[in-house]
Amino acid sequence: MLFSVPIVIIFPKISLFVLILPMVMIVLWLTVGTCPVTDLEKRLLMKYDPKAVYPGSFITYNLQKFFKIKATDRQVDRVGYIIVAVLVLCVAKQYLFPLFF
């Protein structure tokens, strides 16, 4: 999702397409409570390598593992919401208010 913001700014013609995936992910987070890709990964790990199953979400686990950044799932979700809000504003600026900005 993070790379969507510069893509929307650099390639405005595909901005609506780029906005679809983050919006779907936010809806899934709000309705299901978790990322379906993380659930799929954890199920596959349980089946093929139970020792590799990690606690929490994919992003929080890898932030800690690779960057030594301790973040909660809630903090990661909030950053995701902010990124989607910025994307929506960028798209709105391009399509709804092109003359004003």
Image: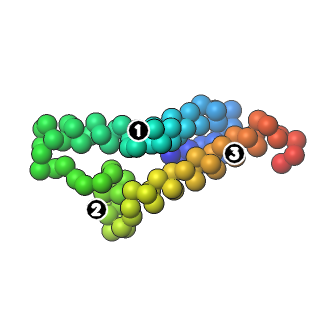
Q: Is residue 90 visible?
A: yes
Give the image location of residue 95, x and y in percent. Answer: 76, 35
Instruction: Answer with mark 2 or mark 1, whichever residue precedes in sequence.
Output: 1
The local secondary structure at tag 1 comes to helix
Instruction: Kindly indicate the quadrant of the structure image that contains residue 72.
Output: bottom left
The residue where tag 1 is placed is 32
Q: Position of residue 7 (x, y in %)?
A: 60, 43
Q: Which residue does the numbered mark 2 point to in the structure image? A: 65
Nearer the observer: mark 3 or 1; the answer is 1
Residue mark closest to the camera, 2 vs 1: 1
How busy is the neighbourhood of tag 2: few (under 14 within 10 Å), some, or many (20 plus)? few
Q: Is residue 24 above or below residue 82?
A: above
| Spot occupied by residue 77 in the image (x, y as percentages of width and height) | 46, 53
Instruction: Residue at 50% x, 38% y: name it.
Output: 27
Three-letter residue code for mark 3:
Cys
Label drawn at residue 90: 3
Q: Amino acid at mark 1?
A: Val
In contact (CB < 8 Å): disc 3 and disc 2: no
Secondary structure category for the residue under label 3: helix
Which numbered marker is on residue 58?
none
Comparing 66 with 47, the one in front is 47
Do tag 2 and tag 1 residues touch (Cβ < 8 Å)? no
Within-10-Å neighbours for mark 3: few <14, some 14–19, many 20+: many
Dot 2: element: helix
**What's the distance in space between the residues labelled 2 and 1, CA to CA?**
26 Å
Say what amino acid the circle numbered 2 marks.
Answer: Lys
Residue 96 picture location, percent across and down:
79, 37
Of the two numbered discs 3 and 1 on the same chain, state the one appearing first in sequence: 1
Residue at the spot x=45%, y=42% of the render? 29
Give left or right: position of 96 versus 27: right
16 relative to 51, above or below: above
